């Protein structure tokens, strides 16, 4: 099952469409959820704000209906369930995704998801959701046939490549594995670097070692290796401009360390134009 959180924004509708296509590719059902304060989810009662609660539930029903209609436009074969999620968006979505393969959310939403990707809610979802999280900002109007994976060489990065290879295989797309590095990172000022140390060759080997084994498990996926001298945010955003999906990890080391909680994550969430998958690695 795939869960998508919607809020009535255009970004939420794009997320619903993306999630529906993904559910169709995987052959799994889709749950469309909208969060509403717990006090507004109850029965009519006689409390002073019963009318407000009724109005909020009507609005939530409209949000869900619009998202379901959008999902059915792009994936009519997918079984879709609507869900009104009581409580704050972050814990409500985490609970809804308890048995899900994937949690999908839109970027820069309104209503219950206002500021979702600018503060603790986004980081909490990416860091604490029980499954992988995909953040949808813009979706290419025409599939480009490429998935991009950010590779940092950490042991946790294997999960990123597992996900990226599987996505490329599902889509019949090419996989572009991108590893960004800076000369100062080789020794990091902590250990001496031999005079004959070749930074670029070492980084190429790092990427090749990271890919080892994944190619054999996915022989039908064409892989393009890209070692870039520079900052990973710049390299990954450029690569995503020609791709359908960017895949990164929730933990890492080097330039990708603290991806979810640090400046690299914040920059990607703000500037990555296409769908961004944050793979659970810890």
Image (spheres, rainbow, N blue to C red):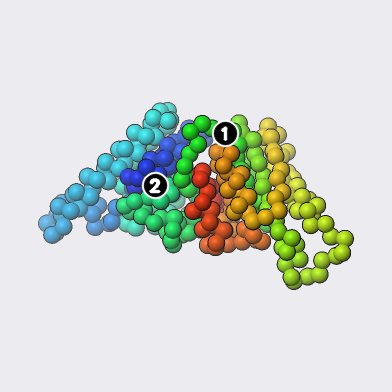
Closer to the chain start, of discs 2 and 1, is: 2
Residue found 52% across the figure and 48% down from its top? 272
User: Which residue of the protein is positioned furthest toward the right in this rendering?
Assistant: 196
Q: Is residue 244 visible?
A: yes
Q: Is residue 28 visible?
A: no
Residue 270 location (% of width, % of height) = 49, 53
SS category of the residue bearing label 1: loop
- Seen in the picture, residue 190 relative to 203 is either above or below; the reply is below
- Seen in the picture, residue 182 relative to 22 is either above or below; the reply is below
> Residue 246, located in which quarter of the rendered image?
top right
Residue matched to label 2: 5
Mark number displayed over residue 38:
none
Residue found 43% across the figure and 49% down from its top? 107
Tell whether 47 sits left or right of 191: left
> Residue 190, located in which quarter of the rendered image?
bottom right
Q: Nearer the viewer, mark 2 or mark 1?
A: 1
Mark number displayed over residue 144:
1
């Amino acid at each position: 099952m795939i869960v998508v959180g919607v809020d009535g924004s255009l970004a939420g509708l794009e997320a619903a469409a993306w999630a529906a296509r993904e559910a169709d590719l995987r052959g799994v059902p889709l749950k469309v959820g909208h969060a509403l304060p717990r006090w507004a989810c109850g029965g009519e009662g006689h409390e002073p704000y019963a009318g407000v609660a009724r109005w909020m539930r009507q609005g939530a029903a409209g949000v869900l209906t619009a998202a379901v209609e959008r999902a059915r436009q792009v994936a009519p074969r997918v079984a879709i369930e609507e869900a009104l999620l009581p409580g704050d968006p972050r814990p409500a979505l985490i609970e809804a995704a308890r048995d899900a393969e994937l949690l999908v959310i839109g970027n820069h939403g309104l209503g219950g998801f206002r500021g979702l990707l600018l503060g603790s809610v986004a980081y909490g979802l990416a860091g604490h959701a029980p499954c992988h999280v995909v953040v949808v900002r813009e979706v290419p109007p025409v599939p480009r046939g490429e998935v991009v994976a950010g590779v940092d060489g950490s042991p946790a990065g294997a999960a990123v490549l597992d996900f990226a290879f599987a996505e490329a295989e599902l889509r019949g797309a090419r996989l572009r594995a991108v590893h960004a590095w800076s000369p100062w990172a080789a020794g990091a000022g902590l250990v001496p670097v031999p005079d004959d140390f070749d930074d670029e060759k070492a980084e190429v080997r790092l990427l090749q070692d990271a890919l080892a084994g994944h190619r054999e498990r996915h022989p039908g996926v064409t892989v393009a290796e890209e070692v870039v001298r520079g900052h990973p945010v710049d390299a990954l955003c450029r690569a995503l401009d020609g791709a359908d999906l960017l895949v990164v990890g929730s933990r890492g080391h080097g330039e990708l360390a603290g991806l979810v909680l640090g400046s690299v994550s914040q920059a990607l969430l703000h500037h990555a134009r296409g769908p961004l998958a944050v793979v659970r690695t810890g």
